[in-house]
Every structure is written in structure tokens, then in C-alpha cells.
Image (spheres, grey):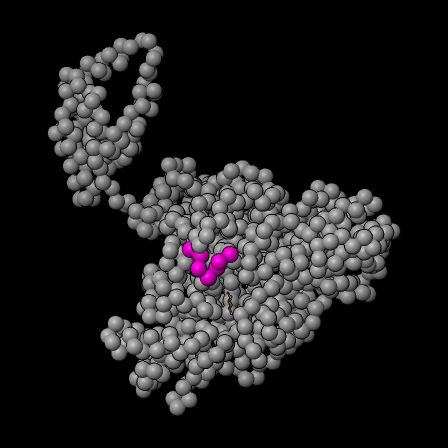
């Protein structure tokens, strides 16, 4: 609706009606105003399919919802590194929303995976903000192309389930910017979600829903967000503060008390009515954006969408290990499928994203007609107890086959929204099953079903490992297609698989602290930590094998020197050198020059996925801007590029760089500087601004008798006790004022004049 008309409509609304728009009608609907033709629209979870509850509503996935197609969860889709594929998933979900008359789907969920222990990691994308924000953007674009809204959630720093409704995520400004906000920033600027959902938690003590700085300063003023902010279900602390901060819509409808508080605040003059008007306009704008573009003809094509779910999942699975090319399987061999998940896979997580799946296709069903496989359940995932009978039967079945494929993973109770994991272990009964099978069968492939990393004590003994994550209702079909080589695996890990829990970056602090989470690891999340510390991992970020091989060549940059305001074009050739068509994930990392600043050894700055026929070569091009080199500078509260030589690299994964080139980047931003008697000589020596001013002063000082004598003594000293280099190193950390103590004849006044001149010089620049 045109703005003028919208404003006209708002002018006809009573204060109570306007305030009414700022909270839901019930669990899933916004209010309408019948007399003015404002419709009541529905919003629904999300993110990887529809959870449309016709009857009783809840946010924990308890009450049944209408049948829908369950797509792969965020943990899987992130591994695709495939914007096009995820966009397609989004388009399909958008179409389903139109068919079910859902105005906005509550997702994508795009919080950073700070620790693999977070119970909700299965819904989130990555430990890396670029991957997270790029894939979320693709999903948003896909859904919204069908004129249905999305809700980028949970803004921001909701990285644990423990006390998620009150806990404060405490971190420094740089960490918040570089990691946690960046995860949202790209998607919000690029894909413009219709809505953003504020998280339950606090950041540095303040509830996100109360934070004007985050909801208005960052989100709207800096990033240009123009939709409405909706509270996570029940994430409103103080309604009037929240409204002023920029939290537009309170969901779900609770009591009317919060609405009344807003009305009272306007009436008693503590809240300007224009705030309510603006909020109302934002909400109405989105409502009409949906209703005016409603597609009444849209149908929910379950069968077709199920196929799309299978296609997406096949592009997500990560082949972690494939010794002696045990995969793809030869269908003429005797193959045993072992494990309950071959028959009833774990394919989605628990909580608000839980979908009442239309149908679930297991690997056992999908393999029918393709190969004769034997099956044994091997374990029951309800209790973590060894069932001797099931185990014995499974070992026998494995022994009689040429290859045993073990379908294992995490049971529902091991990871869910609402609580965090306590460890990274698989159920003991499953690990024991792998061990027993290995005793009788040397050809073992493990197929994992889990929403977050697990430790694998048998990792070195099995020949193949295929990570399916939580692959959606068509996971069986996608798995079989990959196992038998009908499709080529192309997923790469969007998170590190550590060797053990105590290796993880926030091991010492995660889950500790009563109502405070201390983000002590700072910007060193995920691979930024492991690579900087040169630690071994089970599988690094970015790792993923294929049935073919790729070779990278000719990494070029279009300039070897540039300003931070310039754009850098990087290109690299990638060739399929194997025997099967496949997709490569080209990963570009940047290393900053080594300076005083603490920075990760390398960071992913661009990626692309390309399909290549056998023997085919393509050139992949990336455009890098200042953000590829910048860090968040807390003096200027802005992105800043340090002067220096940056390495631009292509990596197979975060550990393994295969090509490297360099670019010299000059900063065009000036950092504020002040000098004092405590400014150190080392700093002044390398500071071009200071050099200009200090020259004459230093000359003057050098001429005084005491300094001359000192210099002579040093020159004539043959003892070698203090040589030139040592002297320079000692001077490095010496504040100006120390010259008073060590250089005879130097006066405080001289130094003070110099400091004044230094400060005047930078002020005038
Ligand atoms: C979850 C949200 C979800 C909402 C509605 C909350 O508890 O955190 O992700 O969209 O419930 O179900």
C-alpha cells in the first residue's frame, strides 16, 4: 500500500486500535481492524518447513500442526554452501506459505554456533558469520520472492539454550560486531527480510528487546532495516521501553496489560504518540505487502516438494571420510544396512521448528529396487542401553555382507531447543555397535544423523563417514543417492568437528555463570580459534570430499596495491580432474598482516559453489571490498583496515591453503591520536605524523651537552653489553617522560612543548 494511503488509514485509527496492532491476536495471528478493512494475518514457524497450528498453539512443538514437508535443517543446509539451492528451498517454502495462507515464516534462525553444545545448533547455520549470513540471505530471498515474509531470528547473540530467556551474553564491542552482528548484517542489508525477531537474552546486561542501540541504532539506522521487529515468543521485558527501542510487535498475545501500559504512557505524556504511529505503519506495511500480493491459486504440492527436500539434502551431505574409495557402493555387492536410523531416520530437531511431516522416506525404503540390502536395527535409541539381542543380530548381518553401512546418530533427547547438550558423545550403545561390527567386518561406512558435531572414537578404523545432519523427511532418498553414486557429494562443513569437547574455544566458560555468559574467547569462534592455535581437529571447517577431484590454479588479483576504498577482483581457476561430474566449494580466506592487533590467522571472506563436468575448468571471480580486510575498531566505532600486506588464499578447508597471493592495502581512514608524556618512543619512531614534528625537537635535544656525552659513550663502548639493537629495543617501550631521568640536560618544558606540537599537528591534519 502506498505510504500516503497507509498514513491516511492510521489517521483514522483510535489510539487503542493502533496500540492493538502492536501485539498479537492470539498465538499465531496479528490483529486486524474490521471496520477499516485491516485483515488479521498469520505467522508460523519455521524455519525449515511449516508448523501451522490450526488448534492449540505452543512454541515448543508440542501440539500437532498441519501436515507439511520437512526440509533439511539449518545445520545441513549451511553445509551446501550453495546459495542457489537454498534459494530454491526458500521459494518452495514461500509457495507453501501462500497455499496455507501464512503471511510470514519465522526464520531463518541464524545465530552463531559458539559452542557445539548449544541445544539449538541444529537450526543454526554456522560458526562463521559470512556463511551464516549468505545462506540466510538466500533463504530469505527465496521465500520473499513469493510475496511472503521471513523473520531473521534470533537477533542477537542467542547462542545457548541455558537460561536463554534471561541470560546476558557479555562480550566486547569488537566481538559483537565481527562475529555476532555480522551474522545478521549481510542478510539484512542484502535480502531485506520483512521482519526481524529479537532474541530473549540480554547483551551486556540489557535485554535485546529493550535495546535502542541494537534495534534502532544498528538494525535500522546503520543497516537500513525497514520491516517490523517482532519479539520472540514472550521476549518482552518492559513494553514501553521496548516500543521506544524499536520492538514493534509483541508476540504472542498475552494479557492486555502491556497494551494498556502503552496507552497509559501516551496519555500521561511519557510516550510520544508518533512512536505508536510509526510502529503501526511498519506493521501495516508488511500486512498489506502480503495481502495485496496474495496468490490464491498457490497449491501445496507435497510430492514435488518432497522431491525438492531430497534434492536439497543431497547437496548438503558432507562426505567426511572415504578411504580406498569405499563409496560409492557397488550395488552388485552384498550390502548390509545396520542401525535403526536406516529404517526410521532422525531427520529433524525438537522444539518450535518441529514439523508434522507429510511422509518420511527412509534409506531402506529408498534403496528398494536399486540394490538388495539386508537390515538389522542394532540398537534402540529410546534408552542408551545395549540391547544384546539387537546387537548380536546386527553383528551377524554385518559379518555376512561385503560392506556394512551403519546408520547412527543423536537421539532426540540428546539435542533440542530448550536445553543444551552436556557432551559431544554418541550414545554408548551405538559406539559399541560400531566397535563390534568392526571386529567382524573391515568394510564399514558410517552414516551420521545429528544436528551438531559428535566425537567419533572409531573414526580412524571405519573406511567411510557420511554426515547427513538432520536432513529432512527425504533424507533416506538423498542418502541412498549419495551412497550409490547417483549423486556426487558436495557438502562442506560449516562448523569444525573437534577431537574432544575440551578443545572447543569456549570450553572453559560455556554454560558457566548463573545468568551471564562470558564470551572470553572473543572473536576466536570456531576455526578462527583452532587455526590460530594450530590445533588438530577431527574435521576442519570447510572440509568435504567428493567422488571426483578438483584442482585450483592461477589465483590472480587485479591489483597488487590498493586503497581500502577500492574493490579487489580475485579470480581462480578450478578444474574437475576426476571421473565424475561434481560441485566444488571454492573458499577464499584472507590473512591480515601481523601487527600489534590480535586477529585470527585467517578468515573466510568469500565462497562459491561451482558445478564442473569431467575435465571442465571454470574461472571463479570474487569482488572483495574493505570488509574483507577490516576489523572493528573501537576508537572510531567503525570498520578499519590496517595498512599492510594481506594474504589472499584459496583453501580446501580452513586448515589447508592451496594457493596464495598478496595485496598491499592502504588505509584511507585516520584514527584519532593523542600524545602525552606517556607516549612511548617506539610508537613515535614508526608514526609518520610524529616524525614530521619530532625532527626539529630531536635535533635540539641531541645538541644538549648531556645527550652528546651519552651518544659518544655509546659509540665508544666496545664491551658489547648494550649494542645498538638492544638499545633500540629498550627504547621501544620507553615513555617520553623517562628521557627526563635518563638523558641529562633534558627539560620537562621541552618535552611538553613537543607533545603540544604533536597534538596540534594531528588536530590540524
Ligand atoms: C522460539 C522461536 C519460535 C517461537 C514461536 C520461541 O520459543 O525461540 O524460534 O519462532 O518460539 O514458536
> Which image quadrant for residue 439?
top right
Instruction: Return the residue nearer the eye: 763 or 166.
Output: 166
In the displayed structure image, the side of residue 315 where residue 732 appears, left or right? left
Closer to the camera, 87 or 69?
Answer: 69
Q: Indicate the position of residue 6 as horizontal and vertical percent values.
A: 35, 82
Quadrant of the rendered image containing residue 39: bottom left
Whether residue 416 sits left or right of residue 762 in the image: it is: right
Q: Is residue 41 visible?
A: yes
Tell me if 757 is positioned left or right of 385 in this view: left
Q: Where is the N terminus found, in terms of image quarters? A: bottom left
Whether residue 133 is visible here, answered yes or no, is no
Q: Residue at x 42, y 77 (%)?
A: 255
Q: Magenta stretch?
A: 162-168
Q: Where is residue 517 in the image (x, y as percent from the top left)?
A: 45, 51
Residue at figure coordinates x 52%, y 53% from the top left: 113
Give the residue displayed 46% in from the left and 74% down from the top: 252
Q: Residue at x 67, y 46 (%)?
A: 456
Magenta span includes 604: no
| Residue sitting at the far left | 749
If the image is split into quadrants, where does the C terminus sit? top left
Residue 428 picture location, percent across and down? 70, 50
683 displayed left or right of 70: left
Q: List x then y, in percent, for residue 574.
A: 59, 49
Of all residues, the one furthest to the right in this rendering is 400
Instruction: Tell which of 624 and 315 is nearer to you.
Output: 315
Q: Which of 183 and 512 is in front in this view?
A: 512
Magenta part, dominant SS: loop
The residue most toward the bottom is 35
Amino acid at each position: 500500500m502506498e505510504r500516503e494511503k497507509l498514513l491516511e488509514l492510521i489517521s483514522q485509527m483510535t489510539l487503542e486500535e493502533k496500540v492493538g496492532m502492536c501485539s498479537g491476536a492470539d498465538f499465531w495471528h496479528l490483529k486486524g481492524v474490521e471496520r477499516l478493512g485491516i485483515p488479521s494475518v498469520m505467522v508460523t514457524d519455521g524455519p525449515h518447513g511449516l508448523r501451522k497450528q490450526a488448534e492449540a498453539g505452543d512454541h515448543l512443538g508440542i501440539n500437532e500442526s498441519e501436515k507439511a514437508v520437512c526440509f533439511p535443517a539449518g545445520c545441513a543446509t549451511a553445509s551446501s554452501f550453495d546459495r542457489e539451492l537454498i534459494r530454491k528451498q526458500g521459494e518452495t517454502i514461500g509457495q507453501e506459505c501462500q497455499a496455507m495462507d501464512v503471511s510470514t515464516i519465522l526464520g531463518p534462525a541464524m545465530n552463531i554456533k559458539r559452542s557445539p553444545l548449544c541445544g539449538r545448533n541444529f537450526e543454526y547455520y554456522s560458526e562463521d558469520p559470512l556463511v551464516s549470513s549468505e545462506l540466510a540471505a538466500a533463504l530469505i530471498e527465496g521465500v520473499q520472492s513469493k510475496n511472503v515474509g521471513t523473520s531473521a531470528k534470533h537477533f542477537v547473540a542467542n547462542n545457548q539454550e541455558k537460561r536463554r530467556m534471561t541470560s546476558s551474553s557479555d562480550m566486547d564491542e569488537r566481538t559483537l560486531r565481527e562475529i555476532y552482528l555480522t551474522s545478521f548484517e549481510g542478510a539484512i542489508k542484502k535480502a531485506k527480510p520483512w521482519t526481524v525477531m529479537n532474541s530473549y537474552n540480554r547483551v551486556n546486561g540489557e535485554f535485546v528487546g529493550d535495546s535502542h542501540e541494537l534495534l534502532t541504532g544498528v538494525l535500522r539506522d546503520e543497516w537500513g532495516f525497514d520491516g517490523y521487529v517482532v519479539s520472540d515468543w514472550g521476549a518482552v521485558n518492559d513494553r514501553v521501553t521496548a516500543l521506544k527501542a524499536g520492538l514493534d510487535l509483541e508476540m504472542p498475545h498475552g494479557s492486555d496489560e502491556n497494551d494498556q501500559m502503552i496507552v497509559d504512557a501516551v496519555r500521561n505524556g511519557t510516550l510520544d504518540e508518533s512512536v505508536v504511529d510509526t510502529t503501526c505503519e511498519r506493521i501495516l506495511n508488511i500486512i498489506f505487502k502480503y495481502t495485496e500480493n496474495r496468490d490464491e491459486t498457490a497449491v501445496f504440492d507435497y510430492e514435488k516438494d518432497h522431491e525438492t527436500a531430497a534434492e536439497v539434502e543431497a547437496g548438503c551431505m558432507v562426505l567426511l571420510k572415504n578411504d580406498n574409495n569405499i563409496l560409492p557402493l557397488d550395488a552388485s555387492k552384498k550390502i548390509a544396512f545396520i542401525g535403526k536410523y536406516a529404517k526410521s531416520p532422525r531427520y529433524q530437531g525438537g522444539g518450535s521448528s518441529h514439523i508434522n511431516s507429510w511422509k518420511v522416506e527412509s534409506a531402506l525404503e529408498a534403496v528398494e529396487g536399486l540394490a538388495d540390502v539386508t537390515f538389522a536395527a542394532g540398537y534402540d535409541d529410546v534408552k542408551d542401553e545395549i540391547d544384546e539381542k539387537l546387537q548380536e543380530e546386527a553383528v551377524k548381518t554385518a559379518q555376512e555382507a561385503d560392506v556394512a553401512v551403519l546408520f547412527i546418530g543423536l537421539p532426540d533427547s540428546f539435542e533440542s531447543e530448550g536445553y543444551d547438550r552436556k557432551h559431544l558423545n554418541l550414545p554408548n550403545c551405538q559406539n559399541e555397535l560400531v566397535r563390534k561390527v568392526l571386529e567382524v567386518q573391515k568394510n564399514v561406512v558410517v552414516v551420521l544423523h545429528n544436528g551438531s558435531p559428535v566425537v567419533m572414537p572409531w573414526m580412524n578404523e571405519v573406511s567411510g563417514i557420511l554426515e547427513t545432519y538432520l536432513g529432512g523427511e527425504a533424507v533416506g532418498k538423498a542418502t541412498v543417492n549419495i551412497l550409490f553414486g547417483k549423486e556426487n557429494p558436495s557438502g562442506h562443513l560449516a562448523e569444525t568437528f573437534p577431537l574432544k569437547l575440551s578443545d572447543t574455544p569456549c570450553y572453559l566458560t560455556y554454560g558457566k555463570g548463573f545468568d551471564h555468559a562470558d564470551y572470553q574467547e572473543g572473536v576466536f569462534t570456531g576455526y578462527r580459534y583452532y587455526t590460530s592455535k594450530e590445533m588438530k581437529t577431527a574435521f576442519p571447517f570447510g572440509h568435504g570430499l567428493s567422488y571426483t577431484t578438483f584442482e585450483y590454479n592461477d589465483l590472480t588479483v587485479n591489483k597488487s596495491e590498493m586503497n581500502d576504498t577500492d574493490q579487489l577482483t580475485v579470480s581462480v581457476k578450478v578444474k574437475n580432474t576426476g571421473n565424475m561430474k561434481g560441485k566444488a566449494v571454492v573458499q577464499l580466506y584472507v590473512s591480515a598482516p601481523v601487527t600489534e592487533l590480535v586477529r585470527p590467522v585467517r578468515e573466510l571472506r568469500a565462497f562459491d559453489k561451482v558445478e564442473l563436468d569431467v575435465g571442465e575448468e571454470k574461472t571463479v571471480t570474487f569482488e572483495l571490498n574493505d570488509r574483507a580486510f577490516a576489523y572493528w575498531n573501537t576508537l572510531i566505532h567503525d570498520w578499519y583496515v590496517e595498512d599492510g600486506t594481506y594474504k589472499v588464499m584459496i583453501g580446501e578447508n580452513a586448515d589447508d591453503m592451496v594457493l596464495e597471493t598478496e595485496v598491499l592495502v592502504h588505509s584511507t581512514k585516520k584514527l584519532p591520536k593523542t600524545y602525552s608524556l606517556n607516549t612511548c618512543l617506539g610508537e613515535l619512531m614508526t608514526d609518520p605524523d610524529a616524525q614530521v614534528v619530532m625532527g626539529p625537537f630531536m635535533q635540539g635535544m641531541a645538541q644538549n651537552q648531556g645527550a652528546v656525552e651519552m651518544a659518544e659513550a655509546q659509540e665508544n663502548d666496545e664491551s658489547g653489553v648494550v649494542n645498538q639493537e638492544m638499545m633500540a629495543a629498550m627504547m621501544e617501550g620507553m615513555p617520553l617522560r623517562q628521557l627526563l631521568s635518563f638523558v641529562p640536560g633534558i627539560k620537562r618544558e621541552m618535552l611538553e612543548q613537543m607533545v603540544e606540537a604533536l597534538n596540534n599537528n594531528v588536530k590540524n591534519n
